[in-house]
Image: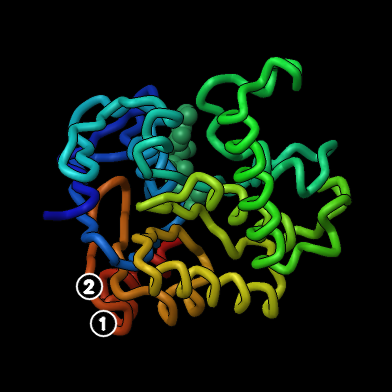
């Protein structure tokens, strides 16, 4: 059974069909790339799957459950997590606080004064702090942990965003253009980390314009055009497909 099953997804904005009866399945453990010309519907696909936008028709099944229209927080708690093209960290907070705050806050305990917190709550908080510090170290952001995240470079922000979403311990990670605006060295670094996460068992779907990085990285490519599936298959075959070449030349 697929981990993610998208069946007949349709979404219109005004008169425009951003998704048109799109069906895509992703198996557990896969690393899948999503490409397509500007306006092909890639972000709308992620938005519908991650609950940011409700589709007009179609069904999203995650881990065997119909999750169509479920809000992003509910999906994140069940293991479906995404990043955005524009990273969402708070610029006036430090790197460390940004990572800590990404942890799910089950009981709103952070609003309680310290004296009223139970030892269970304190243990939980300690675990969150430790996990945040581990992720910051793993992403080599240690030297920046007390900096405001507004001071980071584009590439460092992408790393921070990855550290933040990993606080949620996803089963399925949707990455929206993780290499956009990132220099070649950091691009390779981020690609290696994504590969590492996938090697450790995380299922990953990546939208990316940077085709060379994407084709080297993923097991399978899905190409969208005008909201529909154009071609899918192994990366080397897909990028040579005349329909794909034509779709990109027509941009
Ligand atoms: N909230 C919205 N309101 C109106 N139109 C929208 C909205 N979101 C997307 N669209 C339109 O839907 C179409 C598909 O957009 P989408 O952002 O999904 O494409 P994309 O493949 O991600 O493009 P890009 O590569 O440029 O990010 C576009 O024509 C876009 O203008």
Q: Report the residue at 58% width, 37% height from top.
A: 124
Q: Report the residue at 49% width, 68% height from top.
A: 194
Residue 18 visible: no
Q: Report the residue at 45% width, 58% height from top.
A: 207
Residue 236 visible: yes
> Residue 200 location, x and y as percent?
40, 70
Q: Report the residue at 73% width, 68% height from top.
A: 140
How far separated are the C-alphas under marks 1 and 2? 7 Å
In the rendered image, the residue lying farthest to the front is 119
SS state under label 2: strand
User: In this picture, is 30 found above or below 118?
Assistant: below
* Quadrant hosting residue 163: bottom right
**Crowd tier of the residue under label 2, counting other residues whose Cα lies within 10 Å: few below 14, some 14–19, many 20 or above:** some
Between 242 and 72, the one nearer to me in the picture: 72
Verify CB contact (< 8 Å) between mark 1 and mark 2. Answer: yes
Mark identifier at residue 233: 2
User: In this picture, is 82 found above or below 26?
Assistant: above
| 31 sits to left or right of 229 | right
Look at the image and tell me in which quarter the N terminus lies. Answer: bottom left
* Numbered label tally: 2
Q: How is the image coloured?
A: rainbow
* Quadrant hosting residue 198: bottom left
Return the residue at label 1.
237
> Residue 27 location, x and y as percent?
21, 60
Between 114 and 208, the one nearer to me in the picture: 114
> Residue 47 location, x and y as percent?
41, 37
SS state under label 1: helix
> Residue 153 location, x and y as percent?
80, 59
Between 130 and 201, the one nearer to me in the picture: 130
* Quadrant hosting residue 54: top left
User: In this picture, is 39 found above or below 114?
Assistant: below
In the rendered image, the residue lying farthest to the left is 1
């Amino acid at each position: 059974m697929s981990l993610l099953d998208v069946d007949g997804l349709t979404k219109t904005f005004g008169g425009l069909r951003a998704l048109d009866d799109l069906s895509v399945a992703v198996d557990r453990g896969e690393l899948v790339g999503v490409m397509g010309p500007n306006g092909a519907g890639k972000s709308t696909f992620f938005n519908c799957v991650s609950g940011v936008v409700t589709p007009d028709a179609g069904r999203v099944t995650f881990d065997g459950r119909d999750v169509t229209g479920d809000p992003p927080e509910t999906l994140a708690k069940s293991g479906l997590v995404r990043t955005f093209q524009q990273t969402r960290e708070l610029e006036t907070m430090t790197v460390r606080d940004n990572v800590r705050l990404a942890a799910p806050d089950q009981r709103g305990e952070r609003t309680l004064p310290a004296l009223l917190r139970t030892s269970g709550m304190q243990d939980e908080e300690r675990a969150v702090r430790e996990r945040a510090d581990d992720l910051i170290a793993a992403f080599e952001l240690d030297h920046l942990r007390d900096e405001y995240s507004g001071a980071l470079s584009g590439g460092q922000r992408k790393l921070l965003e990855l550290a933040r979403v990993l606080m949620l311990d996803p089963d399925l990670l949707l990455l929206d253009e993780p290499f956009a605006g990132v220099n070649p060295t950091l691009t390779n670094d981020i690609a290696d980390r994504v590969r590492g996460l996938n090697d450790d068992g995380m299922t990953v779907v990546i939208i990316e314009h940077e085709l060379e990085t994407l084709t080297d990285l993923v097991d399978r490519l899905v190409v969208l055009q005008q909201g529909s599936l154009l071609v899918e298959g192994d990366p080397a075959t897909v990028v040579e497909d005349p329909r794909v070449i034509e779709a990109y030349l027509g941009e």
